[in-house]
Amino acid sequence: MSESEPHRAGFVALVGRPNVGKSTLLNALLERKLSIVSQKPQTTRHRILGVLHRPHYQIALVDTPGLHEGGQRQLNNLMNRTAAATLTEADVVGFVVEALRFTDEDERVLSRIKKSHLPAVLIVNKADRVTPRERLLPFMADLAARHPFVEVVPMSALKLQNVASLPDTLARHLPISPPLFPAEQLTDRSERFQAAEIIREKLTQRLQQEIPYGLSVEIERMQDTEDGRLEIGAVIWVERPGQKGIVIGEGGALLKEIGQRARYDLNGLFGRRTHLELWVKVKENWADNVQALRSFGYENG
């Protein structure tokens, strides 16, 4: 942007079905890890705000839970409402799809975008997997015919291919506005929230096919120690007594491993050594309990 161009600022909602790479894209754009990632669909359960600051624009990027079908639990309904509500607050939509794959769930997301009447940028992620690259052209042309996207951007969030130019692309369609957030603000999420998400990420990655959807993490205590460390006490909530033993592992081995993996990231997040204590507790069917979901910090959309 030239010096004469006006400053732009606004909200960009990153939407799409589960597992298309929205969280990986948010982290790549911010050049730091804010949203947790795993290979499991529906890892993102919350609205995650990350603020990108540039001299001539400010983008409030909003990572959302993947809009999905099939899940009938209160948690699934809440995640879908959260993602849909984000569209009502956005100035621009970043519609993230997977290269060469457009499903019925993608089509339903596109239907919501059409109803929003917002300018939408089509972001074709995982383009690095396509060989030869020319196969992308008819795929993008087909999607461009379905909706008047203001831009179409092929890229790879994981490999950082064509990511650097995306902020300029998004900013072109934001309203003229002064900055909406202070220059030092990266997110609206608390340190407690970020710590809980790091622990949940390690659980989700490690447990794979077992019980990641039945897990929630709650930070009960964060306090400084006399030797300069940060002491964190966290509860891992599961839905059934049988899941408790799975999370703890034989002789406590799995819980110890989770703690070690989480501490590594927590040290980086807080810039100092952390002492992490984990407990596993049971709250029967918490993912269908509205009161429990509210106490765990899940939005109502």
Image (cartoon, helix red, strand yellow):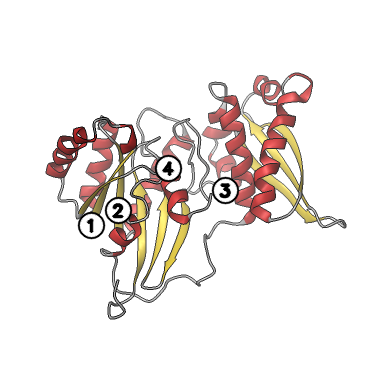
* Mark 2 or mark 3: whose residue is earlier in sequence: 2
Amino acid tagged 2: Val
Q: Marks 3 and 1, Cα distance to the nearest angstrom?
A: 31 Å
> What kind of element bears circle 3?
loop
Considering every residue shown, the one lying at the far bottom of the view is: 4
Residue at (28% x, 81% y) in the render: 4
> What kind of element bears circle 4?
loop
Amino acid tagged 1: Pro
Amino acid tagged 3: Gly
Closer mark to the observer between disc 3 and disc 1: 1
The quarter holding residue 60 reads bottom left
Q: Which residue is mark 1?
A: 119
Compared with residue 8, is residue 206 higher up or lower down, i.e. above or below?
above
Q: Callout 3: few (<14), some (14-19), or many (20+) C-alpha neighbours within 10 Å?
A: few
Q: Which residue is mark 2?
A: 93
> What kind of element bears circle 1?
loop
Residues at marks 1 and 2 touching, judged by CB atoms closer than 8 Å: yes
Closer mark to the observer between disc 3 and disc 4: 4
Q: Which residue is mark 4?
A: 65
**Residue 285 at least partly seen:** no
